[in-house]
Amino acid sequence: MRLVVDLNRCQGFAQCVFLAPDVFALHGEEALLFSPRFDEAQRDRVEKAAAACPVQAILVDYSDEPTSRRSGWSPMSADTDVEVLRREGRIVVVGASLAGLRAAETLREQGFTGSLTMIGDERYEPYDRPPLSKQALLGRARPEDTALPRRRDIDAEWRLGVAAEGLDRDAKQVRLTNGDTVSYDRLLITTGTRARPWFHPEEAALDGVFVLRTRDDSARLLRKLTGGVSRVLVIGAGFTGSEVASACRELGLEVTVAERGPAPLVGALGGVIGAVADRLQRKHGVDLRCGVSVTALEGDDVGRLKRAHLSDGAVIDVEVAVVSLGAMRNTEWLAGSGVAAGPRGIACDAGCRVFDVNGIVTDDIYAAGDVARSPHPLFDYQFLALEHWGNAVEQAEIAAHNMICAGPDRRPHLWLPMFWSTQFGVNIKSVGVPTLGDQLVVAQGALAEERFVAVYGYRGRIIAAAAFDGAKWLGFYEQQIASGAPFPPEYRAVDRRTETLHPIDPAFPDPHLPTHGATVTLTGHSPSERRVAFVPSHA
């Protein structure tokens, strides 16, 4: 840091000399002398002197020190001229993820030329997660080959391998775990989720116990599965757990799946479709055990997993256990910041602007991707938290657009939830929010043939559709959901063989019971977790 003084402008008022006498001095009556360099101990006095100069002749130059340490930087307000923000603003993205990368690309595409900082707790630049439980476990793609393609250069400062641990909204600074702070004019939070760990830390540390969320998780698990093990235990039969079980069977490994619910995928698609997933797994040789939970994992004398104990009293000898109990949203670092963030995510409006704990929308903090939850008009304005690849992309692009636009030019995020999974040779896709449905019909195909389209209804209209090897129909049902088409469907069914269009209960589990969770979560209307009252949708 250094001083620049315009001596042509200086009129010798000497306010600076009184405020910072170790840096400024008068030689004679009016001749000002100053030290161009000053140490950290003088920073506060020099800044006050610069502010007090009646003719504003003193400039403190911070260009030779890191951006995060320039306390003289003055953040732009929410009312700052958009063109100034686009040219000179500082945007920080916390979360080097799919959403974070796509947002950064969109910012540059739409003319943002200011400072852009990307912060990520992993040491890798953004990579694609879906292949980690599919192609990577089968050896068809290396985990290190899952880096996301770049649509353009984003000219960003990357701060990788260091996590955010705090947010100071007044100072507009993100605090990092290494002690650094990063200042922002606009902040985008795309911290996503992490795998829910095994509940007992000592058991979770056993050699052979895994979660699957990151690139490193996938690489470690692949090495273990191809290293001569014979039996694998998968704890939880949600989408990730089912995909792991499918990969293990394709690798020729014996697999036991323990699911506390009545069937696989029950939390996401309901018991009717779960029964189909149940048959599918058993047909492919999975030792599927539903209605039970794992109570303990036991290791040998050298800390290697050797067996698992189940709630029904059974004991299984296993060498690998993959814990697939759902995801936890990465919001803990926001505790005490005044942002409406909690276990269900960060509350934001349809324009991706984050709420504070009092329900007041902010204009300088945005959220996108798995960590965000926002209201959707098609779903009774309930807050939706979506763990969907497509949602992360769409929401990130909307957030980036809105961050550097004037109010009238901002757009809402109204993307319809979509999800896919590949397991046991079957392509499973859904559109809409199945968990909101209170009725179900099979409109195409047949459940018994494991090739069908199930349509979900809610209060007399189509709310979602799920397909097993019926992806060609999903575009049609996307239009039906968006237009609020009536339920049951009024059109003549095509490709229907054994089922009728008579609505049945989709058989979702009691939402009060613990489960691995769905990929779409209804989180209520309140933006403040302190005031949320959960009301089950299927009461």
Image (tube, rainbow, N blue to C red):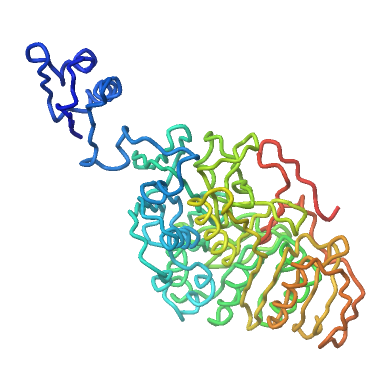
The correct choice, above or below, for 94 with respect to 280 in the image is above
State the residue at coordinates (7%, 15%): 27
Residue 225, x across and y down, in percent: 48, 73
428 or 463: nearer the viewer = 463
State the residue at coordinates (22%, 18%): 16
243 or 302: nearer the viewer = 243
Query: For the view shown, which residue lies furthest in the right direction?
Result: 502
Q: Is residue 199 visible?
A: no
Where residue 183 sits, quadrant-wise, is top left
The correct choice, above or below, for 47 with respect to 193 in the image is above
Quarter holding the N terminus is top left
Instruction: Answer left or right for 50 relative to 181.
Output: left
Instruction: Answer left or right for 138 relative to 308.
Output: left
Instruction: Answer left or right for 503 relative to 21.
Output: right
Count of numbered circles in the view: 0
Residue 290, x across and y down, in percent: 74, 66
515 or 45: nearer the viewer = 45
Residue 167, x across and y down, in percent: 46, 38
Q: Is residue 266 visible?
A: yes
320 or 419: nearer the viewer = 419
Where residue 249 sits, quadrant-wise, is bottom right
Where residue 471 sits, quadrant-wise, is bottom right
State the residue at coordinates (15%, 19%): 24
State the residue at coordinates (43%, 43%): 185
The correct choice, above or below, for 350 with respect to 428 in the image is above
Residue 362, x across and y down, in percent: 56, 40
